[in-house]
Amino acid sequence: MLARVEIPETKPAIELVDGRLVQKISGKRRHQELESRWTVALKAWSDGRGDAYHEWRHEFTAPGHRFASLVPDVAYLSNEALDALGPAASELPPRAPEVAVEILSSGEPERVLNWKIGAYLAAGTTVVFVVDPPRRTVIVHALDPATCTAPTTRFGPGETVVHAALPGFAYQVDAMFEGLYLGG
């Protein structure tokens, strides 16, 4: 069982990253819209086989990392994972999400993002999508069990985000960013 770390309830949320309390950066309109769009896309893809929520806190320990209490912009867990946790534990899962989406915010320290990606993957997250609005790109991070490496794949305008670990998932980059202000 994971030791409970007291984290103040704030808006935006505070995360426990590499032993430090770090407040998330307040999301702009586009950030919140992208959270909503990714939540809808993952729910549609799962077709009732799991659930996705934005700002859903997960607490876990990953090999080589300190205890983490992270609030991904969007997180997905399968019904199998949710059933194993039970209703009470599913409210604040004591495990990493199976899929995490992090949407970059201006001023977010790169070291924090890199630590979070490493912690997610080390704890068993299948795929981490990092969405970069000003660049109109999505960088996909996934652990390759055969090589124990975490190769990345970048998708940009005119392309469709896909990953073998999510059969049937396809999200057009142009549709993702349609109608949003994408400046700095």
Image (spheres, rainbow, N blue to C red):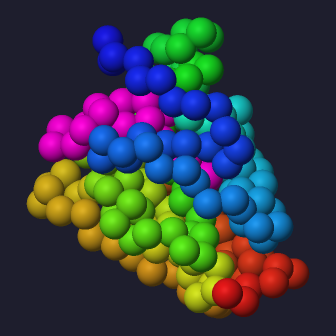
- Above or below for 151 versus 47: below
Residue nearer the viewer, 170 or 136: 136
Quarter of the image where one finds residue 10: top right
- Above or below for 51 versus 177: above
List x then y, in percent, for residue 27.
Answer: 71, 62
Residue at figure coordinates x 59%, y 9% from the top left: 88
Residue at figure coordinates x 30%, y 41% from the top left: 19
Magenta residue check for 163: no
- Above or below for 52 versus 101: above
Quarter of the image where one finds residue 170: bottom right
For the C terminus, which image quadrant? bottom right
Indicate left or right for 93 with 52 as reference: left
Question: What's the magenta region?
Answer: 58-76
List x then y, in percent, for residue 92.
Answer: 55, 23
Magenta residue check for 62: yes
Residue nearer the viewer, 159 or 109: 109
